[in-house]
């Protein structure tokens, strides 16, 4: 629970700093521009969405983490439902990744 709050705080700060892209179009554009350091995908995203972003992450050598659900992910960045968010700052990305679940786990309750 403590790590979840830290992730939320860091993600909110990154959003306020303008270092988060969210939504399919913005994230895809950021990935294509080699600006993304961390991809956050909602745990309840569709299988197709997960596969698409896993492929993008693999091509770009980007760490991908599955967290929460679309509502909670969106809430952290002051938006409505979001299936994906991209952190475009290495410092924020590293700090968030430090508190994220390890590979094979999800941050979904």
Image: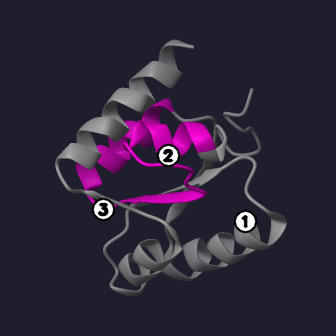
Q: CA distance from mark 1 to mark 3?
A: 19 Å
The range drawn in magenta is 71-99
* Neighbourhood count class around disc 2 (C-alpha, 10 Å): few under 14, some 14–19, many 20 upward: many
Q: Using residue 47 as the reference point, say whether residue 21 is left or right of it.
A: left
- Please tell me which residue lies in front, 104 or 13: 13
Q: Residue at x 30, y 62 (%)?
A: 88
Question: Label 3 near label 1: C-beta < 8 Å?
Answer: no
The secondary element bearing badge 1 is classed as: helix
Decide whether residue 106 is among the magenta residues.
no
Task: Report which residue position mark 1 lands on.
Answer: 50
Q: Which residue ends up furthest to the front in the rendered image?
A: 80
**Which picture quadrant has residue 52?**
bottom right
* Image quarter (top left, top right, bottom left or bottom right) of the C terminus: top right
Q: Reading the chain from its start, which is encountered first: label 1 or label 2?
A: 1
Colour convention of the picture: one colour
- Where is residue 10 shown, x and y percent of the image? 32, 34
Q: CA distance from mark 2 to mark 3?
A: 17 Å
Q: Reading the chain from its start, which is encountered first: label 1 or label 3?
A: 1
- Say which of marks 2 and 3 sits in front: 2
Task: Report which residue position mark 2 lands on.
Answer: 74
Q: Residue at x 71, y 70 (%)?
A: 49
Task: Report which residue position mark 3 lands on.
Answer: 88
């Amino acid at each position: 629970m403590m790590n979840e709050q830290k992730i939320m705080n860091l993600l909110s700060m990154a959003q306020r700093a303008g270092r988060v892209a969210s939504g399919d179009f913005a994230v895809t554009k950021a990935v294509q521009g080699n600006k993304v350091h961390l991809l956050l995908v909602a745990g309840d995203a569709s299988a197709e969405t997960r596969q698409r972003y896993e492929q993008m992450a693999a091509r770009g050598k980007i760490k991908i983490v599955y967290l929460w659900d679309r509502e909670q992910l969106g809430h952290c960045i002051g938006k409505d439902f979001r299936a994906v968010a991209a952190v475009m700052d290495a410092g924020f990305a590293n700090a968030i990744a430090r508190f994220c679940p390890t590979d094979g786990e999800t941050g979904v309750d």
